[in-house]
Image: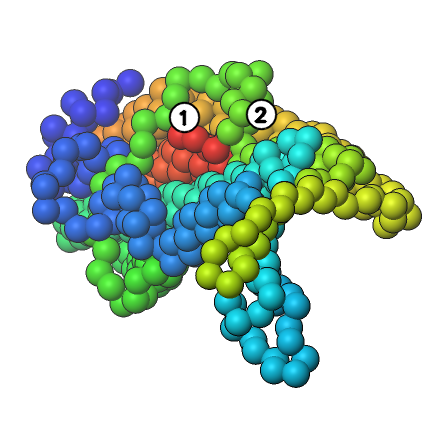
Amino acid sequence: MISFYSALRQFPAAILICVCALGVVSVPAAQSDNAALGASMPPLIEWVDNNNAELAALRHEIEAAKARAQAAGALEDPMFRMELQDIDPDNPQFLPGQVGATKYTVLQNFPLWGKRDLRHDAALSAADEALGRLRATSAELHARVKSAFARYFYVHHAQRLTADVLSLLQDLERIAQTRYSTGLAPQQDVIKAQTEQTALRLELLSLQAEKRQAQARLNALLNRSVAEPLGDPVELRAPPPSIDTARLEERARQGNPQLMVTNAQIQGAQSNDRLVEKNRYPDLTVGVSPIQREDRIDSWELMFEVNIPLQQSARRGQESEAGAMLAAAQQRVQAILAQVSGEIQGAAAGFEAAREQEQLLRSTLLPQAEATFSSALASYQTGKVDFATLLEAQRSIRAARIGLLKARVEVELRLAEIERLTGENL
């Protein structure tokens, strides 16, 4: 069989340029420093992290929760009391030094049995829960941006590929016209080439509309106006060579944002459960009272006070509530682990299938389609095959290229899903 490129050397250079352009699915990684936002994925992720209002609000909630934890572990404000004693009923006075005695008392409550530390831990778990919500929201936004960028990448390069095919068909039409003018081909060949071009122009219009939609969707995720310009997508990330599902599940146990939220809830429930148990024991209040007579401190009093935890029915209800909340959070962890494990298995299987499809298209189907086209082109030039065979060979090359592009995008989509589940980039 005549080789693909040796056959093309027998025909006009324009055809060689157009057909070779069909082989471009991924483009060079290098790009100018002033490339517009949208050329690659990392700047988009950075933009979302720095400009998303929901993420900013969650960061403020984390700071508020940390401040709340600091306050929860602090002592309550002391109490001050002043008592005027031995007031003369015949000549009542209400200022210190004008009565028989004035007693000043300062009271401070001291929670015992580690209650302050437990209150601090319970409140601090709320900060950890807010951090988990921040990471969950961030992971979800990142996954949506990655998916939107992959779609944007697909429609842009499908548009370029279709435009290259259209240019190739215009050259094939000129060959058909030349053969028709010399009586070597029927007029139907020219009409078929023109009809095929019209179908591609319609598809280009559809891809152009899809590209505008993809740009609008991406801008909306970036919290920008939908009319803001985006640079042409240059490249997708290089995927990892393989996926280890066991390792991914272990990483998900450590970094899955939903699990982080639930684990923080467990820690808070455990601290609250211990705190409710400690509330069975009394707290201590210490008071110091200097006593003023006339214009001098005449004596001092020291007071110790404890509360008596007698209301057991209310306390038993609090203990039951804390235990139920702890059990619910622990069960929720098991449910999330099962769900995440299943989703990782599914995403990993999809990733491997897309990678295998990409490799098969690149190494087998596409070279076969190119060889078929080169043979059909040479045979049509010598009148051995009709124009319909040539068009079908051209469609096979385009289908293989589009399939290769779709497989590459599917790899990126599955990778984004896995990263959402594990909470980190692979």
**Residue found 17% across the figure and 47% down from its top:** 171
Q: Name the one closer to the observer, 266 or 150.
A: 266
Q: Name the one closer to the observer, 397 or 330.
A: 330
The residue that mark 2 highlights is: 253
Can residue 339 be seen in this snapshot?
no
> What whole-number distance in Å separates the C-alpha atoms at marks 1 and 2?
15 Å
For mark 2, does the 10 Å Cα neighbourhood hold few (<14), some (14 to 19), or many (20 or more) residues? many
User: Is residue 1 shown left or right of residue 76?
Assistant: left
Depth check, mark 1 against mark 2: the one in front is 2
Can residue 33 be seen in this snapshot?
yes
User: Is residue 386 shown left or right of residue 228?
Assistant: right
Task: Identify whether 219 is placed above or below 136.
Answer: below
**Residue found 34% across the figure and 47% down from its top:** 49
**What amino acid is labelled 2 in the image?**
Arg
**Residue found 78% across the figure and 36% down from its top:** 281
Could you tell me if the residues under marks 1 and 2 are in contact, i.e. CB atoms within 8 Å? no
Disc 1 secondary structure class: loop
Looking at the rendered image, the quarter that the N terminus falls into is: top left
User: Is residue 344 shown left or right of residue 227?
Assistant: right
* Sequence-wise first label, 1 or 2: 2
The residue that mark 1 highlights is: 426
Task: Identify whether 245 is placed above or below 13.
Answer: above
**Residue found 44% across the figure and 44% down from its top:** 138
**What amino acid is labelled 1 in the image?**
Leu
Q: In x, y percent, where is residue 392?
A: 38, 41
Residue 46 figure quarter: top left
Q: Name the one closer to the observer, 227 or 46.
A: 46
Looking at the rendered image, the quarter that the C terminus falls into is: top left
Disc 2 secondary structure class: helix
Q: In x, y percent, where is residue 280?
A: 80, 38
Residue 372 figure quarter: top left
Q: In x, y percent, where is residue 60?
A: 41, 53
